Every structure is written in structure tokens, then in C-alpha cells.
Image: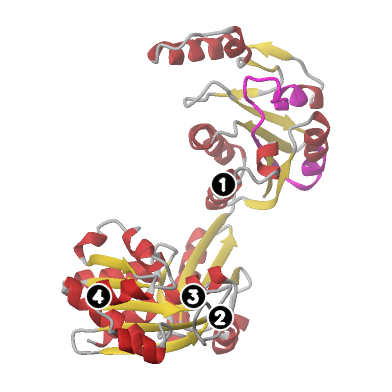
């Protein structure tokens, strides 16, 4: 069972907004066993919409459009759909009544433009929109289901959950799709692939492995697809057990929710220990990762973004002579920063980063991409030097993940 998602709107094509709708729809379709064949973004014009629909109909069982259903003249999707299906627009009084009731609750005037929202092609099945004025529309053409939804995210999601997904489950006999994503840190994609090569080569044919590398981490996504749910679940569990035995030193957890920052937080919370952070080249990224987790205040005390040398001296008590002798990008300064922030906030552990994120090396002799990471523990401090290359975003991302990886390993030792 294959689907295509078509997003309509010039605002996507000119980069004014991100197409978050397609990502969300694809995830929800996948959960019920529908694979997305293609995602397309197009202009809000009759010609472009008709062409995209014609192509999608040839390739997919289900086509979902989002956008172009507003009450203004620049939204032409509904009229285009009527033409595409050799149909005409008709007024649905039940939709008029729904819009009036919605507006009455918020004391908003009902106008002729709002009434036009209740005009839909006669051949469609209207889908009730509890979050806005534009109804969804469900069409059958030959062997394809074509669904048109508003582009406003909360309206689209409401219609998908209330109307579209239940109706798709009822209409089609869908296979089971099971995903498991394993989070690994500390080793690159090619080296991990080499360690698990024999296991990967012997996976059942209905289980596929995908490597998803990112800055300083690697996700391994296993996907099982088939008609028998029990078989998929049993096989997936057995294969995961084999994988965990092959690379136990690299695996942080299963699923995207078990990120390195979540793993560190759980360890600190379990041990009733605390953390403070001193950041230079990472510019607050580590602190952002940690504080994005609900309940982080139970172990994360504070952070100092000491970007300039004078702040390292005044706020973290780094010796000025240390900076003059070794430069701000050095193991010595990184360790002094870690000790300084640990003592300042009386934390059990501390992280410190200093380096050249680029694009220039500023006033140091270190190559762009060089980063020193220091970890202060209850018993001492240590640092490591890394080269993360370019560009700037890569250096910051890799350094932040590596710092948390080092901390996690240190906590596990004690």
C-alpha cells in the first residue's frame, strides 16, 4: 500500500515556512502500515495541482494533499479538484451550520466568504473539521483514494486523527510495519557497519536495516513489514538481542526518545548527582540539549557560556597566565573551566568545552574544528582533544554530543 503526499503553497517553495505537515503525515501513515512513495511540494496553481494529481494517481493507492483550502482567492485547490473530477461545487448546509456554531462560540461574525467554505465538489465525501472552517474532502477515482486537507497544521492533524486514519483503516487491509531505532554513540557509520556485518547479512528478508548518521551519533533503524504481527514482533526482539550483544559499548538506548542527554539525565537522577556546564565554542548547545528534558532541574544546576577570555577569568576563575601560556583553545584551559564551574555551583560533575568552531581561528594557533572537552568528576578532572572538521554547525553538534558521551561513560564508571 503506497501513498503520495502533495503539499500546496508558494510559502513552502520560497523557503518561508518548513514543510512539517509531510513529516507528520508520513509518520502517521507508517504507523498503520502505509508506505509513503513520494512527497511533492507544488505551487498553488490549477495547472500544477492537476499535473501533480495525475502523476500521483498513476503511482499511488492513496494521495493526500494539504494546503490551498483557505477562503481567499489565492487558494484554488477546491476549484481545481472539482475540475479534475469533472464535477461542480455544491453548498453543504451541515458545514454552514458547523461554521456558524463555531463562530458563535467566539463571537465572530459569519460572512459570505465563510459560507463559501461550505462549497465542496458533489462527488467528494466531506470530512468534518473540528478545528477550522475548511472541511476535508475524500474522493475515489478508479483504484485511488484522493484526500484533500487544510494546510494549517492543527487542522490537518485533527482531520487526520478524527477522520482520515480511521477511514483508511476501514477501507484497506493494511500490513503491519514495525520500527525500532537504536541510538549509538562513539563510532562512525563505516566502523559500526564492519562490526555488525555478519548479523546484518543474516537478517530475515522482511527486516531491513538503515544507517542514519548525524553529528557525533548514529541511529540504526530496523524496519519489519508483513502480514503477521506476532512474527514481526518476535523476530524483531530476537534480532535486537543479537545486536545488543555485538555492540553493547556503543548502544545508548532504543527509540529516538532515549537520546544521549536523556541517558545522562537518568543516570544523574538515579545517583542523585548534579551537573554544571561551562561552554565556549558550543555556545550553550549542551545546556539547551539538557534543559529540553522535562524534570532536568533535579540534576542540572546551571551553565556559563564563557565566550570571551575575560569571562573565563572573571566567572570561572581561569588563571590569566594559563590562557596567555597555552591559549584559550587548550586542554589546560578546558580543565580549568570545568573545575571553575564545578566549584562555582558545587556540582558533582561538570562539562567544559573550548575550541575553534570556525569559520576562522580567531586569535589562536589551533586549526578550525579543534575542540577540547573537559570533564570534572567528584575525584578529579580530565580532558580530550578532538578534530571535528567543518562547517561550524558540524563542530558544535559533534562537540556537544561527544561531551555528553564522555560524561555518560564517566558516570557509569563510578
> Quarter of the image holding residue 306?
bottom left
Which sits earlier in the primary sequence, circle 2 or circle 4? 4
Query: Which range of residues does the magenta coloring cover?
Result: 54-81
Q: Secondary structure at mark 3?
A: helix
Q: Which residue is mark 1?
A: 20
Q: Is residue 380 above or below residue 40?
A: below
Query: Residue at 52% of width from left, 65% of height from top?
Result: 232
Label 2: few (<14), some (14–19) or many (≥20) C-alpha neighbours in 10 Å? many
Query: Residue at 55% of width from left, 41% of height from top?
Result: 169
Label 4: few (<14), some (14–19) or many (≥20) C-alpha neighbours in 10 Å? many
Q: Which residue is mark 4?
A: 341
Residue 340: x %, y % from top left: 24, 79
Alpha carbons under labels 2 and 3: distance apart: 14 Å
Alpha carbons under labels 4 and 1: distance apart: 39 Å
Quadrant where the C terminus is found in the figure? bottom left
- The nearer-to-camera label among 2 and 3 is 2
Q: Which residue is mark 2?
A: 368
Dots 3, 1 in contact, CB < 8 A: no
Q: Would residue 172 be seen by someone viewing this image from the given angle?
A: yes
Q: Is residue 167 magenta?
A: no
Which sits earlier in the primary sequence, circle 4 or circle 1? 1
Q: Secondary structure at mark 1?
A: helix
Query: Residue at 83% of width from left, 37% of height from top?
Result: 51
Amino acid at each position: 500500500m503506497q501513498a503520495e503526499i502533495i503539499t500546496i503553497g508558494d510559502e513552502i517553495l520560497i523557503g518561508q515556512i518548513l514543510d512539517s505537515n509531510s513529516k507528520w503525515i508520513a509518520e502517521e501513515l507508517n504507523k498503520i502500515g502505509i508506505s509513503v512513495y513520494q512527497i511533492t511540494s507544488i505551487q498553488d496553481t490549477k495547472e500544477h495541482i492537476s499535473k501533480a494529481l495525475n502523476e500521483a494517481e498513476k503511482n499511488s493507492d492513496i494521495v493526500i494533499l494539504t494546503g490551498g483550502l483557505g477562503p481567499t482567492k489565492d487558494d484554488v485547490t477546491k476549484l481545481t479538484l472539482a475540475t479534475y473530477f469533472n464535477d461542480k461545487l455544491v453548498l453543504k448546509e451541515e458545514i454552514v451550520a458547523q461554521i456558524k456554531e463555531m463562530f458563535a462560540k467566539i463571537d465572530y461574525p459569519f460572512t459570505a466568504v465563510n459560507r463559501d467554505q461550505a462549497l465542496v465538489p458533489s462527488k467528494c465525501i466531506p470530512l468534518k473539521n473540528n478545528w477550522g472552517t475548511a472541511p476535508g474532502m475524500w474522493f475515489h477515482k478508479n483504484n485511488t483514494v484522493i484526500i484533500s486537507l487544510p494546510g494549517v497544521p492543527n487542522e490537518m492533524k485533527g482531520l487526520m486523527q478524527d477522520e482520515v486514519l480511521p477511514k483508511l483503516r476501514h477501507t484497506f487491509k493494511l500490513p503491519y510495519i514495525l520500527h525500532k531505532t537504536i541510538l549509538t554513540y562513539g563510532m562512525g557509520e563505516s566502523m559500526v557497519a564492519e562490526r555488525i556485518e555478519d548479523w546484518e547479512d543474516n537478517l530475515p528478508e522482511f527486516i531491513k536495516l538503515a544507517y542514519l548518521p548525524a553529528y557525533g551519533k548514529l541511529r540504526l533503524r530496523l524496519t519489519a513489514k508483513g502480514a503477521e504481527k506476532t512474527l514481526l514482533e518476535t523476530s524483531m526482539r530476537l534480532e535486537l538481542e543479537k545486536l545488543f550483544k555485538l555492540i553493547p559499548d556503543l548502544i545508548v538506548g532504543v527509540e529516538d526518545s532515549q537520546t544521549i542527554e536523556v541517558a545522562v539525565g537518568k543516570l544523574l537522577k538515579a545517583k542523585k548527582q548534579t551537573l554544571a556546564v561551562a561552554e565556549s565554542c558550543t555556545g550553550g548547545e549542551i545546556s539547551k540539549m539538557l534543559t529540553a528534558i522535562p524534570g532536568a532541574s533535579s540534576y542540572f544546576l546551571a551553565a556559563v557560556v564563557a565566550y570571551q577570555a575575560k569571562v573565563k577569568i572573571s566567572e570561572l576563575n581561569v588563571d590569566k597566565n594559563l590562557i596567555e601560556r597555552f591559549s584559550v583553545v587548550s586542554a589546560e584551559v578546558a580543565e580549568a573551566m570545568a573545575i571553575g564551574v564545578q566549584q562555582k555551583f558545587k556540582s558533582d560533575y561538570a562539562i567544559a568545552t573550548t575550541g575553534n568552531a570556525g569559520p576562522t581561528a580567531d586569535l589562536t594557533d589551533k586549526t578550525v574544528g579543534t575542540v577540547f572537552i573537559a570533564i570534572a568528576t567528584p575525584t578529579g578532572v580530565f580532558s580530550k582533544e578532538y578534530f571535528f572538521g567543518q562547517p561550524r554547525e558540524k563542530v558544535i553538534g559533534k562537540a556537544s554530543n561527544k561531551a555528553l558521551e564522555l560524561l555518560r561513560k564517566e558516570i557509569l564508571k563510578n
